[in-house]
Amino acid sequence: MTGNGGTVPGVRRRDFLAGAAALATAFPLLPKAAVAAGGRALAPTDARIARLGIYPAIGICRVGGSDRWFLAPEVPGLPPRPEGGFKDGEQAIKKQVQRFRVYAFDDQGRVIREVVAGEARIEWRVHVANTKAAWYGFNNPLDNGDLAPGLPGRRRNQYFVTTAERETMLVIDGGETAITGAGTNPDGGDRRYAMGGRFWDQFDVGLGHLRTDDQGRLLVFPPDGRSASPTAAPITSFADNDGWHDDWCDGPVEARVTFADGTAMDADHAWVASVGPNFAPEIPPISTLHDVIASLNVEQGWAPSPAGPISFRRDVYPTFRRLALMEWVAAAANLRQGWLAVGDFADPAYLARLRDPSVGNSEFRRSVFQKFRNPHNDAPDAYITERLKLPLMTGDGINYDGSPLQWFRFPDLQYEHLRLWADGSFVDDFDDAAADAVADLEDIDLAQQPDALTEAALEPCSGGAFHPGVELTYYLRLKEMYARHRDPAAEPFRLALGKRASLVQDIGFLLTPETAFNGNPALGTPPPIGPQGPGDLTRWMGLPWQCDAFSCQQVVMQADFPTAVWWPALLPIDVLPEEYYRNMMRDDLPADQRLKFFESRVAWSRGVAGIGYHANASYWDGITNMIALWERMGFVVKRPGPSGDPRLAAIPGEVYVEVGRGNMEGRFRWTPSMGDLPN
């Protein structure tokens, strides 16, 4: 589904994946639909409804300035594919809309069916807020102990002292919004379903709106991604800028279902967060938020520990594929042979060896496994011994030289899957024609659909490093955040829902590890790492969001080569620009010249820090200008490579190209008082 109610993409995912098994040898990097292991089963046909639940348990919207939109992914392993691409022209980014559904279960937790408007009245209630300006500053994660001690953060906008004043001036909250029926608010213009509030007690800030589809499912539309300062305050920090607001938001999604016989039931709540765009939407991050939370679930005993043999397709291949795709967004990965003697994960022959579970292939598998960074190595020299490992990304403890947490670490479950693979405890189920044919949620077994929706929503989100991160941050790996921590009957991925009197959470002058986990008894304040309220997830992120997102590209460490990166799968570093791609595809150019264009990369952020001819442009100029220029950034998407010329054999059949980049040129220095740059 895309733009202004359109429903049929130009190329359906079913068509895209048709025959994927036959093509696997030639194109090993095809997205592979695969649902994480779950324990659900189908209920008998005569089962009675004992419980209802909303899915995904955590949903993700992505901001954009366009009125056009597309649905968030609903099948794990398959990216969104909006008709006409991710931008509306070169200036406006399409919104990613999260759809929520209700499923019914029997008294043994077995899936009965999805509940839709034809059989019941579903009243949806959504309460999102933006409380960033009323929260505390970010320095680093507070849960890493002695390896990277948590640094205290003071209140943002601390010149507003009382809770009442901070709530009036700094919290953007329009309260709860309700919607019911099928096809309600189809064009999004009904103000009854708009969400938003006021900042500085003067300025209206939209936080998105609600619609329903033709089956009564909830559609949550994000806001436009705008940031502003009513005081024209300068940008002085990557994360904490007083006098600023943005329109990221989050909060609970609830539903009351009334059946034809008058029976009414409340569904288990979900959560929605509106965050920034994913600028490489077909390239998943190395570790995802789903990986992070799934690992926590196993650690806490809320989900079973993996026992071999595991599935290559579901548990191992995604990591290899993500590593292979990193070469399209980061030069460090493109030059991996120079700093790490590991093969090409995109090479069909190499993939064939990776898929081989035989005893005779054990030495090869173990040699590859040794190239991955060990998340359990806390030795004093781990900073050195684990540096040139996969992936070369910075970690939570970037501000502690010599800490092993300066480098990215896999979630334990993802690393355990790699260990089991290295031991040969896996099944080569890579070629699965039935799974390859999955294109839509309805193609997945009913019993798997609820969990598939949650996995698909979280799979495109970055699972680290959390400094603070791209969409959401480190608290999602902490047990205290989840309903299951307090209720053994709750599902593992559901956040704990709190009911505070105020959205302002005052825990004292400083946010410290102690107050984050224990609250402030003297003030009667519960811990922020605990049950959540509207705005509680996004408040930890950078303010305004553009400054953190675009300041964190790569980090020059003590060694110049290779250069470590932050989150290239969502915010690319080095890309193949569209103009180079066009020349690479020109039949009238000599083959050696076409290869030069293919082998060349440019900075995705080019032209941002130091707009136009300003010789004195600086880091601060760059992240300040990004507040207005962010929608002009290009998206990295898949395009066909050249064919038929053996001299171009080095160019793969599919390449990933930066497209839709707008004009970054400006003959003036932008300042916050000017508002948005003209399109």
Image (cartoon, rainbow, N blue to C red):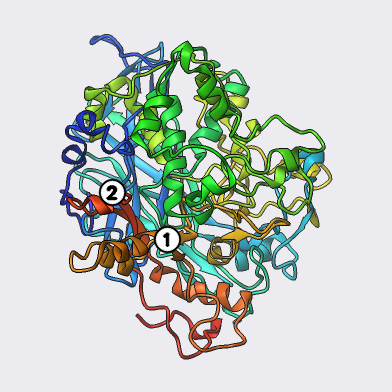
Q: Quadrant of the C terminus?
A: bottom left
Residue 194 vertical position relative to residue 115 in the rendered view, above or below: below
Image position, residue 555 (x, y; %): 64, 59
Asked whether residue 314 is in view, the answer is yes
Label 1 sits on residue: 575
- Residue closest to the eye, 137 or 561: 561
Of residues 462 and 616, the one nearer the viewer is 616
Name the residue located 80 percent from the left edge and 45 percent from the top edge. 149
Name the foreground residue: 665 vs 449: 665
| Secondary structure under the numbered disc 1 in the rendered image | strand
Place of residue 189 in the rendered image (x, y in percent of width and height, measured from the top left)? 27, 63
Instruction: Give the number of callouts.
Output: 2
The amino acid type, in three-letter code, at marker 1 is: Val
Q: Which residue is mark 2?
A: 649
Note whether 534 is above or below 75 in the view shown: below
Location of residue 302 by image quarter: top right
| Residue 469: numbered disc | none
Q: In the rendered image of this protein, does residue 328 appear above or below residue 349?
A: below
Q: Give the residue type that dot 2 points to.
A: Ala
Measure how far apart labels 1 and 2 are at the Cα level: 20 Å
Residue at 61% of width from left, 65% of height from top? 170
